[in-house]
Image (cartoon, rainbow, N blue to C red):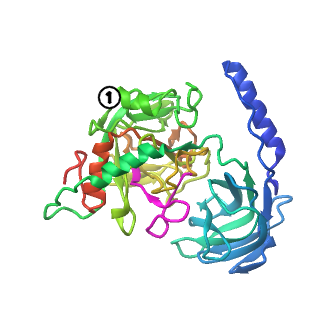
Amino acid sequence: MPRHPARLSTLLAGALVVLLAAALNLTVSTPKAQAAAITVQAESYAAQSGVTLEATADTGGGDNAAFLAAGDWMRFDNVDLGTAGRLTVSARIASAAGSGTIELRTSTVTGPLLAVIEVAPTGGWQTWVTRTTEVSTHPTGAQTVFAVMRSTAPGDFVNINWFSFAGDGDGQGAGWVPVDQAKWNAQLAQFRAMTPAPVPAGVVRVPEFNATCAYSHSKPDDPIVLPGLPGASHMHSFFGNKGTDAFSTTQSLLNSKATTCAPAEDLSAYWIPTLYEGDKAVEPQNMIVYYGSRLTDPSTTVPFPEGFRMIAGNAKAQTPTPAGSPGQYWCAGPGGEIGRSADGNWPICAPTAYLTHQLVFPDCWDGKNLDSPDHKSHVAFTYDGKCSGAYPVAIPNLSFVVTYPTQGSAAGLRLASGMASSVHGDFFNAWDNTAQGHRVKDCITQKAKCNSAGTF
């Protein structure tokens, strides 16, 4: 892998977009020129704590800051963050174990939060990937920037090769969908005026409600990643809104009034890559979508704004997932797992158990955007039980629990997106605001377990 982001890949990507557009008879506008990226090598720190250096394994990689753990930090002086406007922040990282975040702060090690880079295992300490996030507001010009490691797991969790900072200078950017502040303020006012229902004695004190959504249909569509391009995606299995397709919008989902979910007030669209056993699709009978909280104080949680959307997981992740890997599939029911597929990536379940997966979404929001270019940069996972910094708004902690009518086999399974590691899920919010608001108020903020009807 090159040490600096290559311009050739950008040119090729642009050419492919133009060719695809011509084939589809689409109009393509020339992307706005972006300021040249400022790349900061990890080994160029002015001060550090807990950092050692090692050579990267790939040609031209230079040194990297190696085997970083929670609390380790590096200081970089005179980092030019450019002029006001949106800033793209990237880091080239590698990880063999553990997960966490890299906090980028200005001025001091506890100074204002600039950006948060998510860290998850990449397949090895020298298996490098580039993680990117977007920042809507930031200090300008030369700044002192601290990179601070955060993780709840013990031990080392990340290596860092470099950081880059690129701005477009106008405060906007392709792929960002700003929230309509007037509508959001009205939705918040309605929510805050709601009187919570009394919690009966004996109710389990867990902040949670759910929607139980039957399988609806399958299409090679993705209205979040590839809007308006039917057939351009790998196959997805859709739950909830029956009308979901490549052309779905907030308004079309709200207008459809047809859902496979209980309650009927949830017209949201949920989808995951289709699972295959051989060449046969294995469709779950239903998906339970849990809305909960991992926060120390769940009473700070607010509903999702109308039209909010996000993605969890990574469709491009193609790495082995042997037993014990994070986010793996497992066997639910009596007997549990009795073996593994020949490639070790899939469990084989007892005849009385079924293949299951849970996909967890971020639970902190920037409060400004309904979506972002990568459909992730407007949200983040809490690592300390609260939402703060660039992601100050607590939203329900969404998770998909999917059980498939199969026990698997030695031959293994595959997803439409590839290996088991590529599992991902999409959420496009189209709840009735009143129905969602009452559930958040009654169940999550009061820390009381509710059912699909929103009752205790």
Quadrant containing the C terminus in the rendered view: bottom left
Residue 237 image offset from top left, x and y in percent: 44, 34
Q: Is residue 199 magenta?
A: no
Image position of 353 with respect to 392: above or below: above
Magenta stretch: dominant secondary structure? loop
Q: Is residue 9 left or right of residue 437?
A: right
Query: What is the quadrant of residue 408 in the picture?
Result: top left
Image position of 378 with respect to 106: above or below: above
In the image, 113 versus 267, the foreground residue is 113
Residue 279 image offset from top left, x and y in percent: 51, 30
Amino acid type at mark 1:
Lys
Which residue ends up furthest to the front in the rendered image?
Answer: 182
Which residue ends up furthest to the right in the rendered image?
Answer: 60
Q: Is residue 398 magenta?
A: yes
Q: For mark 1, what is the residue?
A: 257
In the image, 149 versus 180, the foreground residue is 180
Residue 15 image offset from top left, x and y in percent: 78, 31
Count of marks overlaid on the render: 1
Image position of 140 with respect to 350: above or below: below
- Note whether residue 350 is visible: no
Q: Circle 1: is it few (<14), some (14-19), or many (20+) Cα within 10 Å?
A: some
Q: Is residue 443 left or right of residue 327?
A: left
Q: Magenta stretch: give its range.
A: 378-401
Helix, strand or loop at disc 1?
loop
Residue depicted at x 79% and y 54%: 37
In the image, 91 versus 425, the foreground residue is 91
- Note whether residue 452 is visible: yes
In the image, 265 versus 158, the foreground residue is 265
Residue 83 image offset from top left, x and y in percent: 74, 56
Q: Is residue 181 left or right of residue 122?
A: left
